[in-house]
Amino acid sequence: MAATEAPKTWPTLEVLRPVPSELHPATDNPDLLEINLGPNHPSTHGVLRLVTTLDGEIVVGLKCEIGYVHTGIEKNIEQKTYWKAIPYVPRMDYLSFFSGETAFCMAVEKALELEVPRRAEWIRVLFQELARLHSHLIFLGTGSVDLGGIALLFYCFRARDEVLDLFEMATGQRMHPRYCQVGGVAEDLPKGFEPKCREMIAFMRDQVDQYDELIAANPIWSQRTKGIGVLPPDFALQMGMTGPNLRASGVPYDLRTANGGYGAYREIGYTPVTEQAGDTHARFRVRIEEMRASLDVIEKVLDGIPAGPVIADDRKVVLPPRHELHTSMESLIHHFKLVTEGFTVPAGEVYAPIESARGEFGFHMVSDGGPKPWRVRLRSPSLVLLQSLAALAQGAYLADLIAILASIDPVLGDVDR
Amino acid sequence: MTDAILQANSPTWGAPDHGAADRLEAALGRGVVERRVEHRGELTLDVPVARLPEVCRHLRDEEGYDLLSSVTGVDYLGYEGEVAGYWGGGADGRDLNRSASAGKRAVPEAPGPKRFGVSVTLAKVLTVADGDHRRLRVRVWVDDGEAVPTLTGVYPSADFHEREAWDLLGIEFAGHPNLRRILMPEDWGGHPQRKDYPLGGEPVQFSDEV
């Protein structure tokens, strides 16, 4: 299906005043109805409470109340040595889990000025794209349920299992693998991974085509999504929107290519997927096309992955290989020191952003020269994109609010951390 | 350390934008950039706290930094001076409430003059062709109780970031239209991300006997 076209003129979307992220009703008409959408409602994709004011069926007021799954991950990471902090990270954005691990390890590597072996960079790209695929599949499935089409949920969850099987095969875990390490990845790809991955690619290409047909030719789908929640690019940037939502408004900004990209994307290359219309339909389309693009990247990785080590050999930072512990006293000492004390990171402030499935996912890390981070802040894309919801929902039907929320794709674990 | 490695390790930052800092000084006076810090290829400009919105407005309008990437508060209480072992304990065992980051210090030096640092990371998106999406960090220093002027007038997306910094660190943002707690419950006492807020010391919620 052809890409969406840009509207001839973007609708003017003013930043809401006084509060940019909240829509207050213009009148205090007593007939207005205030309802709580959530916190426990499937259409809020987690534990999000939307305090909505309705005039009939029209949304005239909206406030996002968040924090229901705040678990203090940033505070906890301050109490952990760097390598013990890695498992916390993927539990925030639990749909695009591998992006979190990679972003954290990249921030630590940047602070350490540690070089990562090429093969490890390629493996990271492979799993980042698998995680993106996984995230977009859930997006499509749950998004279609919000629009009343339940079939796609089952198809997407079946396809998602194929992706998780690959994670299980390589890392031992279906989700939250803790596979990314500071300096590389934990293990090399297992035997038989490549053919299984190629099988998945073939299967998934077919599946994505089917999903596309299923919704593209559906008139109800088109009517529910086209022209709904139009996000002009300048407004999107003012509200800090990044990732697929920004690209759906025609801005080809993707950290995988910006300034040449990061990690192995510098070698593999990538072309950002954009759509022009900026509406709910475009945001769905951009993710469907990104699934195809991810499959292409995964195939390129399988075709061109270089040989070599999968983790750096800096023994002050990286655990020695297991077999050396039986024969080498020095390795045993390194192992002991790393496990009990951790490694120290030079003092200073770094910020390492990567492109997760929802946009710019960055770690702002301050080190004091000790073995634990002094402060870590997670710039989660979901927290930022939720701010635009009130402006997008202004004057929309309540049912469209659900569609818009689904299309901007926040993950509440990522919002609340 | 070669440039190639540094480039690979500092994704999406681009070259340090000293030119923007020079033009900023030319436009707003020499005192506006108190210090330039370059660490791992990232350029940080320390600016006077009262001039933060003015600086950001200049960077947005004249230099094209159109995306506010994040606003991060950092509590530097006890950052320098202290030397402690990994366990953060003394002769009578491990003290869970000690600052757990008090490990081996390579650089025991305070990075700024006051307790809290507020870092604002900016990026160029729309205003440049692909390949030069530079980033720049502007930082201000405040003490407990001192307010930072809000950035919501310049970058509306600062709203949630600033509410979070207030909620977790107790940094006040003067002029913010809606400065209330965002992640913690509304009746929560204290600001949990501060270094003097103990981990594990708070009462467990909803555990009262009925």
Image: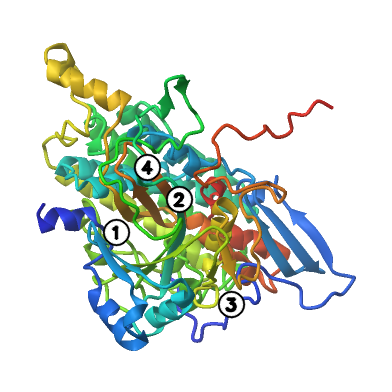
Q: In which chain is the residue bearing label 1?
A: A
Q: Amino acid at mark 1?
A: Arg
Secondary structure category for the residue under label 4: strand
Quadrant occupied by the N terminus of chain A: bottom left
Q: Earlier in the sequence, mark 4 or mark 3?
A: 3
Q: Are marks 4 and 3 in contact (CB under 8 Å)?
A: no
Q: Earlier in the sequence, mark 2 or mark 1?
A: 2
Task: Give x and y (percent) for residue A79.
Answer: 44, 35
Task: Give x and y (percent) for residue A289.
Answer: 39, 59
Q: In which chain is the residue bearing label 2?
A: A
Front of the two marks 4 and 1:
4
Label 2: which residue?
A136
Label 1: which residue?
A256
Label 4: which residue?
A373
Whether residue A330 sits left or right of residue A87 in the image: it is: left
Residues at marks 2 and 1, CA–CA distance in whole angstroms: 17 Å
